Amino acid sequence: MPRELLIEAAERWGTPLYVTDLDAAAAAAHAWRSALPGALVAYAVKANPDPALLRRLVIEGFGFEVVGPVELALALRAGCPPERVVVNGVGQTDADLADGLATGALVNAETLGALDVLVHAGPGRIGLRLNPGLEADTHPYLATGAADAKFGLALDELPVAMDMVKRAGRAVASIGAHIGSEIDDPQSFGRLATLISSLAQETGATQVDLGGGFAGSPAAWAAAVRPHLPEAMRLIVEPGRSIVRDAGWLLTRVARVQARGHLIADAGMTEFLRPMLYGSRHAVTVLTPGTDLPPHEGDWTLSGPICESGDVLSRHVEEPSGEGALIAIGQAGAYGLAMASTYNGRLRAAQAVIEGETLRLSRRRETLEDLVARDA
Ligand code: LLP
């Protein structure tokens, strides 16, 4: 952890503050590339759309997986060539789909209705995202591959889908699936690779897209997947969390102490929803201590300032410290700033990045003027 830089960042821009280490994220992306030579490593922008991070990954030659038209626009604004962009999204409108295709990105159909729009739109690369009917071991909110999930075309819809494609005189550029997130078992991806590569061969697609979602090392993923893919098959992977999880921190200060065991931080569910939504646990490091705490029997909880009892960042804080303590919440680079909200009138926190030994602001803190700018 770049402790001194984190302390300096909090002093310069205040808290709550998200900090992303671009070198660490780039190194994690390179680990995917080295494990899978020749594959398109398309970082899932939804994990952390920090603009400086996106630009850095473009410079390093990576692509992006985006959901919907706005993330697509962010990817292109960051300078990503459209050939390196994969567009997903189960609820895209006709215009979203046609416009996406026109950019030159690969656009995946997730429903027969979307496919119908894509095959009759202008030229472009169409992919099929399938629902593989594979269960993966993860939190129920993070599983997407089971047969009753809303994502992707059902396997038994594939013949109809291929018929639509052929009748329109089109071809399928890629066949893919995404089975969920925070999956530890690489064998889940081995099974997916077996299924998708045989379907790709049946349909004449020359690319397979095995989605994101692996929580382990790229080398372990590659070892489980490679044996099931023919040499000539081009591969797309869409890792999000594994590129940024350990490359980001949420900095927060203890604002108040509630003597019955709550350290009230200046960040909460509006800045970091994961502990509340998935019960996730994250490292809590005191960077600079605060005031001494009053006596309290039992554990301290790091709570947020929001009017919700479930607004907790961490239970059983190991190193509790009082008002003014500067705290870094770890493993917060993925799905932290990406899931922020303005509930309770919270202004979205600033974002800073580390590159080499330098710190810079990549997005300023939201202001009241920003918040009311759309009022009619
Ligand atoms: N590709 C697709 C089509 C996806 O839907 C996702 C994530 C990814 C790739 C990247 O998955 P990753 O490698 O990051 O696991 N908010 C949740 C995670 C939701 C993931 C949604 N889709 C969380 O905080 O854990």
Image (tube, helix red, strand yellow):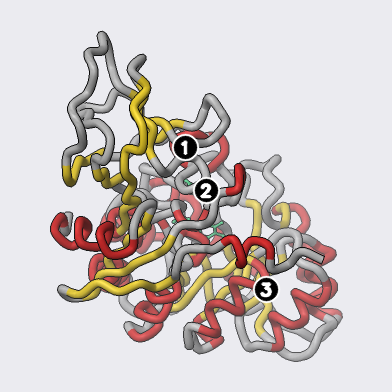
How far, Cα to Cα, is label 1 from label 3? 28 Å
Left or right of 286 on screen, residue 238: right
Q: Residue at x 20, y 62 (%)?
A: 8
Helix, strand or loop under label 1: loop
How far, Cα to Cα, is label 2 from label 1? 8 Å
> Of label 2 and label 1, which has the lower sequence position?
1
Residue pointed to by mark 3 = 69
Helix, strand or loop under label 2: loop
In the image, residue 32 sits, relative to residue 266, either above or below, namely below
Q: Mark 1 or mark 3: which is in front?
A: 3
Helix, strand or loop under label 3: helix
In the image, residue 291 sits, relative to residue 37, either above or below, namely above
Quadrant for residue 106, please give it: bottom right
> Of label 3 and label 2, which has the lower sequence position?
3
Mark 2 neighbour density, 10 Å: few (under 14) some (14–19) many (20 or more): many
- Contact (Cβ within 8 Å) of mark 1 with mark 3: no
In the image, residue 272 sits, relative to residue 239, either above or below, namely above
Q: Position of residue 154 (x, y in %)?
A: 72, 52
Q: Residue at x 57, y 69 (%)?
A: 66
- Contact (Cβ within 8 Å) of mark 2 with mark 1: yes
Left or right of 81 on screen, residue 25: left
Q: Mark 3 or mark 2: which is in front?
A: 3
Residue pointed to by mark 1 = 138
Q: Nearer the viewer, residue 214 or 269?
A: 269
Residue pointed to by mark 2 = 180
Please, what is the three-letter code of the amino acid marked with disc 3?
Pro
